[in-house]
Image: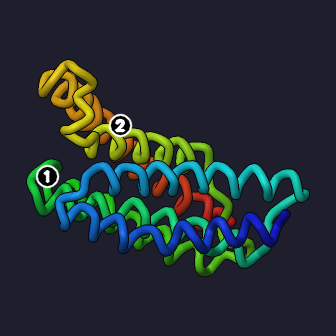
Amino acid sequence: MRRLADLLTLARAVLGLPLLLALAGGRPALAWVLLLLGGLSDWADGALARRAGGGSVWGARLDPLTDKILISAPLIWLAHTGGLPLWAVWLLLARELLISGWRAGQGSGGPASLGGKAKTILQFLSLLLLLWPPAWGLGQGAGLVAALQAAGWWLFWPSLLLALSSALGYLGAGQRG
């Protein structure tokens, strides 16, 4: 089970580039599906690792990095297209680099805090809503798509606050430890 969890983590790392290419190529439905698959694989590899009594050290180090790759691709795209402010995306990506550096110095890979996990879930939900394909208006037309994308925009801000507060928690715990 640990090996399967590690394979899912590795597969998720590869999804970032095709996701970005789908967005740049005007294929929002494909990009959305790739992001959803990435989020589901994050949940699945965690569940498999827990069933196996814990993940591998390699998986513990790679898992947070693959989340960063998968989330960074659409964030960069949204900043590029004006869907999110560049300063907010920059702040979030700077936080991710800082915490990734901190985790690299931890023997266990620095397990995710509850705030960090909540941040990741909110980011995935926010991005799924922000990237909702216009063709999927479900008979409601542009109004439903605009409402879903607006909900994603509003979910982004608490995810940013959780990212910053969890970073303070990680770094504070590192100074105490």
- Residue lying furthest right in this view? 53
Q: CA distance from mark 2 to mark 1?
A: 15 Å
Q: Which residue is mark 2?
A: 158
Q: Position of residue 105 (x, y in %)?
A: 61, 80
Q: Position of residue 67 (x, y in %)?
A: 50, 62
Decide if residue 164 is on the left or right side of residue 21: right
For marks 2 and 1, the one nearer the N-term is 1
Decide if residue 43 is on the left or right side of residue 15: right
Q: Position of residue 83 (x, y in %)?
A: 14, 48
Residue closest to the eye, 20 or 57:
20
Q: Residue at x 80, y 72 (%)?
A: 3
Q: Residue at x 80, y 65 (%)?
A: 55
Q: Residue at x 44, y 66 (%)?
A: 68
Choose top left, top right, bottom left or bottom right for residue 63: bottom right
What residue type is disc 2 on? Pro
Tell me the number on the disc at residue 57. Answer: none
In the rendered image, the quadrant that contains the N terminus is bottom right
Q: Which residue is mark 1?
A: 85
- Could you say whether the residue bearing mark 1 is in a helix, strand or loop? loop
- Could you say whether the residue bearing mark 2 is in a helix, strand or loop? helix
* Residue count near mark 2 (Cα–Cα under 10 Å), binned few <14, some 14–19, many ≥20: some
What residue type is disc 1 on? Pro
